[in-house]
Image (spheres, rainbow, N blue to C red):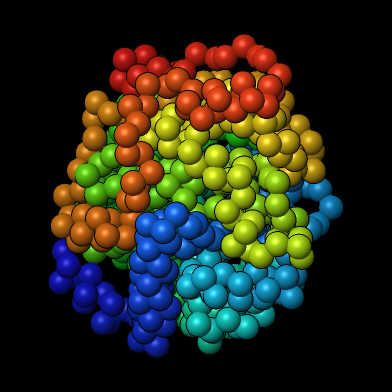
């Protein structure tokens, strides 16, 4: 498998783009994680990877979308992005995930990439705005990988994404990238309507045949004003996705990303471990894209970026999340998250201003945490990389994850006296009871 992957790199890529990836993402990205680990040992904090929603607008209307895509357009402009990236680079960062809305609707997106040739950008996109001309500029910049979302067959794609002819337009965007030899990825938000079509060896083989170099199967999470919980996977289906990813990683010449497990198969949350946080189109700094509450903004000139990411709110979020579960606290204990938001008077960072109500109305569900079935990586390469560069970084040490509130939050209740409320039942143990 590794020889086949090497052959693909040698024969199917633009060597300049491979070198830029190796230098900016491989070497500099590795150095940013090592600096992150050294900071943790000194009791300091700054995430090595940042995910930035540069725009709220989108041409699609996906089921379960939590972004205010129909609101007045808001962007992080070139000047603000350059300031953000420059401050992050001073901390050793080199990798930035670019999300939206639809990032390619941002009028200055390409200029942002071109202004920072020493960084690497992964753009989460539906692909509809990647014309041949855009793909050529991305190739010239050399520091961008498009990660294009495919959500199912023609019928399922239209249903999932709220428009017509979605799949054909997306696949044309993919092809424009491949024609220009960009290092292209394809991702899927796996849900009940697409798991049987896309979480398959046949789909993986098709991606390889097309020339796609990596893929990402992430689990659908019911958030936002129209959460569409009927799309959620059962615990058994979530386990099936994990088993599939581990199996394909060991046998197929395509990289498969995951952000929710270490090399031994133990669940983790990137926001809880501190490896990444999120910035929304208004500049608000959030724990992750689906937790839309913030106490700091990148536009605040009174603090450094380092001070903002070391805020008490984000620090206590990491402690609460890591002491409560190895999975997703939003799904398993939304009541505790609500208490934390109230305790720190974190503002609702949405336009709709219903984020608290959405938390209160959430049904408790299982997430990736399944202690009874931890599936170890079969590939020694993935195990090795995760051991040194992507794991829990000690965030979960000493916690039994019984589902009770973290001790520091209990103490905070006593000291600060947030409003008392009924506590919901913790998430059921995976495999024994369905949500």
Q: Position of 77 compared to 407: left or right?
A: right
**x and y, in percent, of residue 209 in the image:** 31, 65
Position of the N terminus by quadrant: bottom left
In this rendering, the answer to whether 378 lies above or below 16 is: above
One can see residue 172 in this view: no
In this rendering, the answer to whether 133 lies above or below 29 is: below
One can see residue 106 in this view: yes
> Residue 132, located in which quarter of the rendered image?
bottom right
Looking at this view, is 401 or 415 the one in front? 415
**x and y, in percent, of residue 270 in the image:** 44, 48
In this rendering, the answer to whether 388 lies above or below 118 is: above
Residue depicted at 62% across the width and 83% down the height = 115
> Residue 360, located in which quarter of the rendered image?
top right
Q: Position of 150 compared to 127: left or right?
A: left
Q: Residue furthest right?
A: 72
**x and y, in percent, of residue 32 in the image:** 42, 69
> Residue 196, located in which quarter of the rendered image?
top left
Position of the C terminus by quadrant: top left
Q: Count the numbered circles shown.
A: 0
Q: Position of 334 compared to 92: left or right?
A: right
Looking at this view, is 162 or 254 the one in front? 254
**x and y, in percent, of residue 230 in the image:** 54, 25
Residue depicted at 43% across the width and 37% down the height = 322
Residue depicted at 62% across the width and 59% down the height = 307
């Amino acid at each position: 498998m590794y020889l086949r992957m090497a052959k693909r790199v040698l024969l199917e890529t633009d060597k300049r783009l491979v070198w830029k990836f190796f230098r900016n993402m491989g070497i500099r990205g590795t150095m940013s994680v090592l600096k992150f680990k050294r900071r943790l040992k000194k009791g300091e904090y700054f995430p090595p990877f940042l995910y930035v929603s540069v725009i709220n607008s989108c041409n699609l209307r996906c089921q379960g979308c939590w972004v205010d895509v129909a609101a007045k357009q808001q962007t992080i402009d070139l000047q603000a992005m350059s300031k953000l990236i420059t401050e992050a680079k001073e901390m050793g960062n080199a990798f930035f995930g670019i999300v939206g809305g639809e990032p390619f609707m941002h009028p200055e997106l390409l200029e942002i990439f071109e202004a920072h040739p020493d960084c690497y950008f992964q753009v989460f996109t539906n692909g509809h705005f990647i014309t041949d001309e855009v793909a050529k500029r991305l190739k010239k910049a050399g520091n961008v990988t498009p990660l294009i979302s495919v959500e199912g067959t023609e019928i399922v794609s239209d249903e999932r994404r709220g428009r017509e002819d979605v799949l054909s337009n997306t696949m044309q965007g993919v092809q424009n990238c491949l024609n220009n030899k960009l290092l292209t990825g394809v991702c899927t938000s796996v849900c009940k309507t697409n798991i049987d079509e896309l979480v398959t060896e046949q789909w993986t083989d098709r991606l390889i045949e097309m020339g796609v170099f990596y893929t990402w199967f992430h689990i659908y999470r019911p958030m936002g004003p129209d959460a569409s919980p009927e799309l959620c996977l059962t615990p058994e289906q979530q386990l099936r996705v994990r088993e599939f990813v581990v199996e394909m990683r060991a046998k197929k010449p395509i990289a498969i990303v995951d952000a929710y497990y270490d090399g031994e198969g133990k669940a983790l949350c990137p926001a809880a471990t501190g490896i990444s946080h999120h910035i929304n189109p208004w500049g608000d700094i959030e724990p992750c894209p689906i937790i839309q509450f913030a106490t700091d903004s990148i536009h605040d000139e009174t603090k450094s970026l380092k001070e903002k990411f070391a805020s008490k709110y984000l620090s206590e979020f990491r402690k609460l999340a890591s002491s409560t579960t190895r999975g997703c606290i939003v799904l398993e204990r939304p009541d505790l998250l609500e208490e934390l938001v109230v305790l720190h008077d974190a503002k609702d960072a949405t336009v709709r201003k219903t984020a608290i109500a959405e938390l209160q109305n959430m049904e408790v569900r299982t997430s990736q945490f399944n202690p009874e079935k931890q599936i170890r990586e079969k590939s020694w390469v993935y195990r090795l990389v995760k051991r040194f560069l992507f794991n829990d970084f000690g965030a979960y040490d000493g916690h039994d994850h019984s589902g009770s509130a973290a001790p520091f939050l209990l103490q905070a209740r006593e000291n600060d006296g947030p409003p008392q409320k009924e506590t919901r039942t913790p998430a059921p143990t995976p495999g024994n009871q369905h949500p």
